[in-house]
């Protein structure tokens, strides 16, 4: 069922690993200059002292974006791999989410976790990404889940956990529910969510070095972990969107993307000629948007105060206030 086409970025081993496990790591994929630029003022933006953990008021922070670089320039090696996983650059909608920015996801840990381990399946926030559209088996809005490492992340230092054997739970649920779903509510332990984390047996902690990019199948269940070591962890999670929905009934099998093939392989079929969605495709403003706008205002004020103190300018697209959210399509 492997597509027979030319690959320039993904090795045969990486392609097989993606089809088997649903993820692949692209080492040293981000240009060093971007890693430096996007983290140089992170502590100013947070308002925390990097040398005083008592100032770290929150364990996890999803920071807003102030600066951005086109994805193919930000991480050219990873961009090539992304295109090959999705069936070609021509299938990617670069009018949506075509850039990577400094919207850092910070995990600083908490004192309570330094001597108290928690089993991965009990982390409680197992999910798949995409809080801005109706999910169907063939949705193309979340073409891949992308994790960019901005610092070295070792074991027990807040790396994202994934559950590769949980992909089958998501695929099966969406296959059986062609009406789709806008959000994936779940019990605190994840037992009855679409991911069904409590039924999973395989849990992997994603570690790596600064500049590594990890590409996950969009149906890969994943969860934030506990940063037991309290070594500050910085990642981003830039989305990539397709122009069209996934296609599970292509006339030429070689045209299937690796993302499509993984779904078909999971279902044990070569195609799905009769499967159709039974509801309207919708896009909407993310539920987290209001909170991000408030954080933007706070961070810009901190950056202005810092610039006034040391001299220099504030480098932010939001210098005159939060830029309106642009990706709302009903």
Image (cartoon, rainbow, N blue to C red):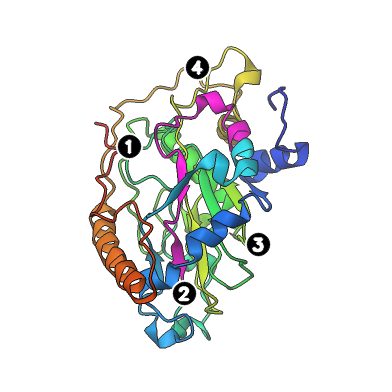
Q: Position of residue 52 (x, y in %)?
A: 45, 87
Secondary element type, mark 4 = loop
Residue at which label 2 appears: 108
Q: Nearer the viewer, mark 4 or mark 1?
A: 1
Q: Which residue is rendered at x = 73% and y = 25% of the image?
A: 6
Q: Nearer the viewer, mark 4 or mark 3?
A: 3
Image marks 4 and 1: residues in contact by CB distance under 8 Å: no
Q: Earlier in the sequence, mark 3 or mark 1?
A: 1
Whether residue 239 is visible: no
Residue at which label 3 appears: 209
Label drawn at residue 273 = 4
Secondary element type, mark 3 = loop
Q: Position of residue 261 (x, y in %)?
A: 60, 30
Q: Quadrant of residue 88?
A: top right
What is the distance, in whole Å, between disc 2 and disc 4 at their CAs?
A: 47 Å
Residue at which label 1 appears: 134
């Amino acid at each position: 069922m492997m597509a027979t086409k030319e690959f320039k970025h993904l090795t045969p081993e990486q392609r097989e690993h993606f089809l088997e496990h649903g993820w692949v790591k692209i080492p040293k994929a981000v240009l060093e200059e971007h890693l430096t630029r996007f983290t140089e003022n992170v502590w100013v933006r947070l308002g925390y002292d990097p040398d005083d953990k008592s100032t770290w008021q929150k364990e996890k922070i999803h920071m807003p974006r102030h600066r951005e670089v086109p994805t193919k320039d930000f991480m050219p090696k990873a961009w090539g791999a992304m295109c090959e996983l999705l069936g070609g650059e021509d299938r990617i909608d670069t009018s949506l989410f075509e850039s990577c920015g400094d919207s850092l996801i910070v995990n600083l840990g908490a004192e309570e976790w330094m001597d108290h381990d928690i089993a991965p399946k009990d982390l409680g926030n197992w999910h798949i990404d995409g809080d801005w559209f109706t999910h169907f088996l063939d949705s193309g809005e979340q073409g891949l889940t992308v994790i960019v490492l901005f610092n070295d992340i070792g074991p027990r230092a807040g790396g994202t956990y994934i559950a590769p054997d949980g992909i089958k739970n998501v695929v099966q649920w969406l296959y059986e529910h062609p009406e789709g779903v806008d959000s994936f509510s779940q019990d605190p332990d994840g037992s009855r969510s679409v991911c069904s984390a409590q039924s999973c047996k395989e849990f992997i902690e994603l570690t790596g070095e600064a500049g590594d990019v990890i590409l996950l199948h969009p149906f890969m269940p994943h969860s934030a972990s506990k940063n037991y070591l309290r070594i500050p962890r910085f990642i981003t999670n830039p989305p990539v969107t397709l122009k069209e929905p996934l296609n599970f009934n292509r006339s030429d099998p070689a045209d299937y993307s690796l993302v499509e093939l993984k779904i078909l392989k999971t279902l044990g079929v070569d195609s799905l000629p009769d499967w159709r969605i039974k509801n309207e495709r919708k896009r909407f403003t993310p539920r987290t948007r209001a909170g991000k706008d408030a954080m933007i205002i706070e961070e810009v004020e901190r950056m202005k105060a810092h610039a006034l103190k040391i001299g220099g300018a504030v480098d932010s697209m939001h210098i005159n206030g939060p830029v309106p959210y642009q990706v709302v399509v009903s």
